[in-house]
């Protein structure tokens, strides 16, 4: 009985890994962003969720708060630097001490992407705006603060598609994903440059390259695969997703948003304090470089 009580008191006072840390996650309202948010929150971080889908961000923050976590949310369009600056000011007034930044928001193409075999100008504009300039805007909104406090962790969400040209594996995909794949490669190079620039200020900058996770982005890709590849005509979107996983990922199973959240959690933890400038493959072996 006494031992049980001592154990319970011990559990209650045990410090969580990210206690007193504040993390901002862009595109944090759904999919991978939600997984990252949940993992960091469960490990004690106060989380600031921003998204163009303001309601979904608000709902997630309410869910986390009612489960005993500490979350705020707000509208941000990562293409609009002003909305990011306003959200960062809000984080500082509510929590202070922001030191973890996860640029995660991303798009695979522009409107009606799923029904095209080839990219158009708006696919290039949209993916470069959101996936590349949006990441730069996000980093710019926190950089000065991280430098002045001599503390910061940045983890950019790239993709295994940013690691290599495709060709094998993805049967008859057409060219429509070219802008997306270029944007994901570009953020890896940007991450390298940031790691060099910010390392002397005690700021670690890394990227995570996920493989395949069933989210709205992947559903749009599956619809497009069906459009491009007649072999997929009779398959459901989810069956196409599973088939594509088997083609390119040696582990051959769908990943979860929490798989990516766990990798992010490692990279922002003290265990990874000597890791910077790295793009970590978390993609079941889809890319090995
Ligand atoms: N799902 C996958 O298999 C996969 C694989 C590799 C990389 N990724 C990357 O992971 C990230 C998250 O994707 P996901 O699969 O969770 O997709 P998702 O569509 O579920 O999530 C993307 C989130 O970003 C938000 N968003 C979109 N544009 C925005 C903008 N301009 N400003 C702010 N928020 C915006 C959306 O509202 C959404 O909540 C993306 O960068 C994506 O490229 C996904």
Image (cartoon, rainbow, N blue to C red):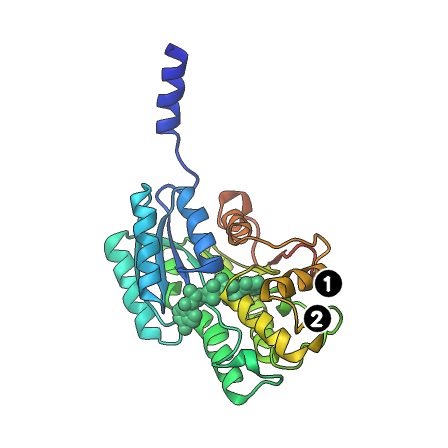
The percent position of residue 96, horizontal first and vertical second, equals: 28, 53
Q: Which residue is mark 1?
A: 247
The percent position of residue 217, horizontal first and vertical second, equals: 52, 68
Name the residue at 36% across, 52% down. 47
Question: Relative to 134, is 53 on the left or the right?
Answer: left
The percent position of residue 199, horizontal first and vertical second, equals: 51, 58
Q: Which residue is mark 2?
A: 170
Name the residue at 74% across, 74% down. 167
Q: Are marks 2 and 1 in contact (CB under 8 Å)?
A: yes
The percent position of residue 244, horizontal first and vertical second, equals: 68, 64
152 vs 180: above or below: above
Name the residue at 53% across, 80% down. 113
Quadrant in the picture for residue 187: bottom right
The number of numbered discs placed on residues in the rendered structure image is 2
Quadrant in the picture for residue 220: bottom right
Chain-order first, disc 2 or disc 1:
2
What is the distance, in whole Å, between disc 2 and disc 1 at their CAs?
7 Å
Name the residue at 68% across, 77% down. 229
173 vs 236: above or below: below
Q: Residue furthest bottom?
A: 121
Q: Residue furthest front?
A: 234
Quadrant in the picture for residue 287: bottom right
How would you rate the neighbour count of disc 2 (Cα within 10 Å): few for under 14, some for 14-19, many for 20 or more?
some
Kindly state the secondary structure of the residue where label 2 is placed.
loop
Instruction: Work out whether residue 99 or residue 86 is closer to the camera in this orientation and state it.
Output: 86
Instruction: Work out whether residue 275 or residue 33 is closer to the camera in this orientation and state it.
Output: 33
Instruction: Work out whether residue 240 or residue 48 is closer to the camera in this orientation and state it.
Output: 240
Please indicate, yes or no, whether residue 86 appears anywhere in the rendered image: yes
228 vs 147: above or below: below
């Amino acid at each position: 009985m006494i031992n049980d009580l001592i154990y319970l008191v011990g559990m209650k006072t045990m410090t969580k890994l990210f206690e007193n840390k504040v993390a901002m996650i862009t595109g944090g309202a759904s999919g991978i962003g939600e997984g990252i948010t949940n993992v960091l929150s469960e490990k004690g971080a106060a989380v600031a969720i921003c998204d163009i889908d303001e309601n979904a961000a608000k709902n997630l923050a309410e869910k986390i708060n009612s489960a005993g976590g500490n979350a705020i949310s707000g509208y941000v369009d990562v293409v609009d630097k002003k909305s990011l600056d306003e959200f960062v000011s809000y984080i500082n007034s509510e929590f202070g001490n922001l030191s973890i930044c996860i640029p995660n928001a991303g798009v695979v193409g522009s409107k009606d992407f799923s029904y095209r075999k080839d990219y158009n100008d708006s696919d290039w504009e949209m993916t470069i705006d959101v996936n590349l300039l949006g990441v730069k805007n996000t980093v710019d909104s926190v950089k000065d603060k991280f430098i002045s406090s001599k503390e910061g962790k940045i983890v950019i969400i790239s993709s295994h598609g940013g690691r290599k040209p495709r060709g094998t594996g993805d049967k008859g995909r057409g060219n429509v994903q070219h802008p997306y794949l270029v944007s994901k490669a570009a953020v890896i190079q940007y991450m390298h440059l940031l790691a060099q620039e910010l390392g002397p200020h005690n700021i670690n900058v890394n990227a995570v390259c996920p493989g395949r996770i069933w989210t709205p982005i992947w559903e749009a890709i599956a619809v497009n695969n069906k459009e491009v590849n007649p072999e997929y005509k009779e398959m459901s979107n989810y069956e196409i997703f599973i088939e594509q996983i088997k083609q390119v990922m040696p582990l051959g199973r769908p990943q979860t948003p929490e798989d990516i959240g766990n990798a992010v959690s490692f990279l922002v933890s003290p265990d990874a304090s000597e890791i910077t400038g790295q793009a970590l493959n978390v993609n079941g072996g889809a890319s090995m470089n």
